[in-house]
Amino acid sequence: MAAAHSRQFAVGSRPAAGSPGIGNTRLAGLHPSVLADGESISVREDARRRPAALQTGISNARPLVAALPPCVLRSRHATLGTPLCTLLLLALVVVLAAAGCHREPEGLPQPPPPPKLVSQDPWRLTIREPGPARAYLGNGYLGVSASQEGWARDGEETLPGFLSGYYVGESFAPGPDWAAPVITVNGRRLSPDGAREYEQTLDLSRGLLQTRYRQARRPGVLVEATLFPARHDPYLGVLQVSLTPERHCTLTVDPAFTARPEVAAVTQDRMTIPGQASMPLPAGPIRLRKGETLTLTRYAGVCHRRDAADRQGGLARRSVEAAVGLGFPEVLRRHTAAWEKLWERDIAIAGDPRVQQVVNAFRYYLLASVREDVADSVPPMGLSSSIYQGHIFWDADVWVFPALVPQYPELARSLVEYRYRTLPAARENARRQGLPGADYVWQSAAIGRENAPGDFARGRHVTAGVALAQWQYYLWTGDREWLRTRGYPVLRDTADCWAGRADLNQAAGRYEIRGVMGPDETRGPVDNNAWTNSMAQLNLQLAARAAEILGERPDPRWAEVARKLWIPFDKAAGRYRQCDGADGRAKQADCELILYPRRLAMPPEVAARTYDFYRRSVIRTGPAMTFSIHAIIAAQLGRPQEAAECFRESSEPFLVAPYHLFSERRTNARRTCFVTGLAGSLQAILYGFAGLEPTEAGLRAHPLLPRGWTGLRVTGIRWRGESRAVVVK
């Protein structure tokens, strides 16, 4: 917990200049505030003033931020084999993007709208009519989707669930259908269609879905269901359904449990009727009298065989047996307690109740997608979908990781552990290119080998993004043993790769990186992409600094290449350029990324010109993350109105009713949760509005409220074993 007291921080002297981008660099002349050990920062300000008007004495100059949107395109198009095909497809994407979103032809029937959210409670999202609703629940290991029925079934359709790190071949594969039983009443499938007294609540605080309705047709069965993957036990899923008929009836329950290769799955279905002891669910029909309640409780143990030492399902079986022994009330209590412990670390917003509710949902979906003590990363859709084959992109290191690590370093560690686990594959990828060291692939699965087709494999900035996450984990935790055994091998080998990849332009006296794909893939491969080159420079500097910390001898070539690596700059315009060649319209933020998370040192006026130019260049119908980047930059430039508008644009057009799922596209796909996108919005709060900046010298804060908010409180910030808080009023 944060310290009970708080104080305002006065401006300190400017830290000594360090190597650009090593965590303590910022715009020239900035004087950030430092969050001292055991203390919180409390800032009072007029949210409509520029930072110069802050009453706290905290410097108004702010390091600029930008971040990286993963492309709408990504590399799922397996036919991108030739440059001509690539160019044609990219041109098509530009045309479609410029036109806005996909539009259905007129005259086609449109799907019914989802039910409306009726609750304003920040943690309990409630609907009171059935309809095409989707809920996503997870415990970081098991993910499950549910419909209006209250479990993983929607009519005749079974909604797939997923396991962390479970791939068949190189594709993210559905796990066992543990939450999709088929229940019939008098021979007809149970359904909420036309139901009376319908209510469904996604309880974010407890990580569970509760559904209650009375069936419209006879015998008028009252249905009450509770669904959750247990947070206290990664391998346990629980579904409880209570049925109370208004007339005598006959029930049947088909477990509908489908096994999957290399997954151990064990279930116990228990039945309870008042006045009788709990018993196994019988295989045949069950007769119920009027007003009699039958409660079915399913305990499912699901475990990837790679995670079980005996590979015979013992871990899954033990989870089920323990749950049966404890009973449903105690299992629910332990599950709830595990979530409550996570929620002790909070983001509280004053002045906008709807944003608070949305942010709570985003935080739940983020935490539902990651778990401690594993070496798996987070796919773009978390555990909600197999879109993009569940592959791991730069999303994980540069989007998801920064949203986790300030408050949940124990969860964020899983992402950097995945990169350490797949380091051998990165080394092999570099070797195949004739390069030294390690080069991480654009999209990877279980073992880290390349799955990207065509030119998408040229997205080499992914390697530097991996290195940045390794360094950030060290900054937040201060764990030198981890740095020595895990982080430094990644930093060292990736630096070696950049030193080998950069070409010396002797005429210009500089190093260059040619033929790489930047964040804006619509441009195709380019020379000297500013984001790629600046991140390669940072990677080289971080490896050298890590070596110094550990008493190792850094390769002198790292410093040479970093010092001379060209980052395109337009002297006439006084700003950085996206790459060599002409500037044009962009699908998503690209050059802005040198401002954040790169934090490339530059004068404030250069940063403003760079941001303003590319803000105008990006299409307005692009990915959500562009606008979360712009929200951060606007906040750090001291533009509260612009920050508020960009933050709103980063989430509102992508929200999926009723439970604030995040769609990758503005067409609001209802079956997925785009964790990358919602992580961008959370980064806007943490690094833009709260203004967090981890450095070797300490944790700094440069807070600024967006217009419309009256307060922001971020608690449970974990900084090198201590707790911090930022409070802005």
Image (cartoon, rainbow, N blue to C red):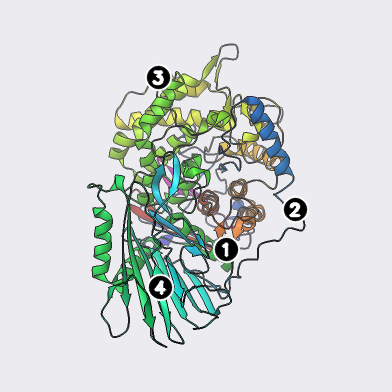
* Residue identified by numbered label 2: 105
Mark in the foreground, 4 or 1: 4
> In the displayed structure, does residue 96 sit left or right of residue 623?
right
* Residue identified by numbered label 4: 252
**Amino acid beneath label 4:** Thr
* Residue identified by numbered label 1: 355
* Picture layout, residue 690 above or below residue 214: above
Q: CA distance from mark 1 to mark 2?
A: 34 Å
Residue 505 at what x, y percent from top left?
A: 57, 14
Task: Residue at the far right: name it.
Answer: 106
**Amino acid beneath label 2:** Pro
Secondary element at image label 4: strand
Q: Of the residues under marks 1 and 2, which one precedes in the sequence?
A: 2
* Residue identified by numbered label 3: 556
Q: CA distance from mark 4 to mark 1?
A: 44 Å
Secondary element at image label 3: helix
Q: Quadrant of residue 119?
A: bottom right
Q: 326 and 465: which one is in front?
A: 326
Q: Which residues are magenta?
A: 692-706
Q: Of the residues under marks 4 and 3, which one precedes in the sequence?
A: 4
Residue 264 at what x, y percent from top left?
A: 31, 52
Could you tell me if residue 545 is visible in this image? no
